[in-house]
Structures are given as structure tokens and as C-alpha cells.
Image: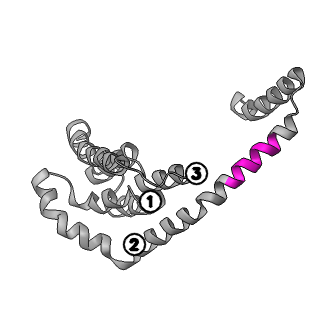
Amino acid sequence: MNFGDLVIPLMVGFILFYGFFKRIPVFSCFVEGAKEGLSSAVSILPTLCALCLAVGMIRSSGVLEVLADAVTPVCHALHFLPEVLPLALMRPISGSGALALLEDLFAQYGADSLIGKTASVLMGSTETTFYTIAVYYGAVQITNSRHTVVCALLADLAGFLLSNFFTRLLLT
């Protein structure tokens, strides 16, 4: 048995011991926190349902492929691998959808190919922008995201372009 197997039980034991020592009603605090967590989950559920529906529609309608084909000339001009473009378009919308596309790229080109390496760096250096904004802004009832979406998408674009650049520079 290693230390990693004991981390969670030790942490729970520490919390219980600390609560007992400070005379804090640990169970009541736990129930109150669970209640708040449940109300947060209920408040963001409609947003998550809408996002899941949109991702399903995008994947099954073929819009992603049409959009990727339309942007392919720009990819060639920027020396961006067009095979990774559907992943780059899906990543801001859905982590699980992007992961499915990543697995498809690995199956088709291999994980150690330039495309596989670029896709891996892209996945690690970008965020599921719309999911993150929907969850966190929905949890605190922020309805006006102002410049958040634009700035986050610009950061994703930088991640897309730089993943391609640095993969070619460092891993080929």
C-alpha cells in the first residue's frame, strides 16, 4: 500500500478531528454544503442541457465538416494542419466532443504522428470555452458575459495556432 491510497482517508480523518477539536458540527456543515451544491447544480442544469443538445446537433448535422472545408484555405496559408481543424472548432464547445475527435485522429493518423502530437498539444493548451462560461456564469446568474467570450475565443485561437507552431518547432 502506498501513500496515495491513504490521502483521502487521512484528509477525511483530519477534517473530522479538526471539527471535533474546534467544536464545529461537521455533519451539519456537510449537509449545508451539499444543499448549496445541489441548488447550484439545479440552477445550471438548463444551460448544460442546451449545450449538450447544441453539441449533438453540430456533430450529427455535418456543420463542423462544412465549416472546416470552408476554412481549409486559411489553414494552408497559416501552415495549420487542416486535419486538426475540426478538433480546433469543437474544442471551445465541448470537451467530450473534442475528445471523440481526438480519438478519431489518433485512430486515423496515430498518436505519434505530427497530426496526433499537434492535436494533443491543442487539447492541453485550450479550454472548453462555452461550457466553462455556461457553467460558471450560470452558477452565479451572470447573464451579460461582456468581453469574456471574445477574449476567451482569442485565447483559444492563440492556443490553436501556437500548438501547431510549437509542435512543428519542438517535436518534429
Secondary structure under tag 3 reads: helix
Question: Residue at (25%, 61%) from the top-left corner?
Answer: 83
Q: Extreme bottom residue here? A: 61
Question: Residue at (27%, 49%) from the top-left corner?
Answer: 157
Sequence-wise first label, 1 or 3:
1
User: Disc 3 marks which residue?
Assistant: 139
Alpha carbons under labels 2 and 3: distance apart: 27 Å
Q: Nearer the viewer, residue 117 or 140?
A: 140
Q: Extreme top residue here? A: 21
- Tell me if residue 152 is in the magenta stretch: no
Q: Residue 23, position in %: x, y?
A: 90, 24
- Quarter containing the N terminus: top right
Range shown magenta: 30-39
Q: Extreme left residue here? A: 77
- Tell me if residue 33 is in the magenta stretch: yes
Q: Amino acid at mark 1?
A: Ser
Q: Nearer the viewer, residue 54 or 123?
A: 54
Secondary structure under tag 2 reads: helix
- Tell me, for residue 59, which label it has, or none: 2
Compared with residue 23, is residue 103 higher up or lower down, i.e. above or below?
A: below
User: Disc 1 marks which residue?
Assistant: 94
Q: Is residue 162 left or right of residue 41?
A: left
Q: Amino acid at mark 3?
A: Ala
Q: How many marks?
A: 3
Q: Amino acid at mark 2?
A: Arg
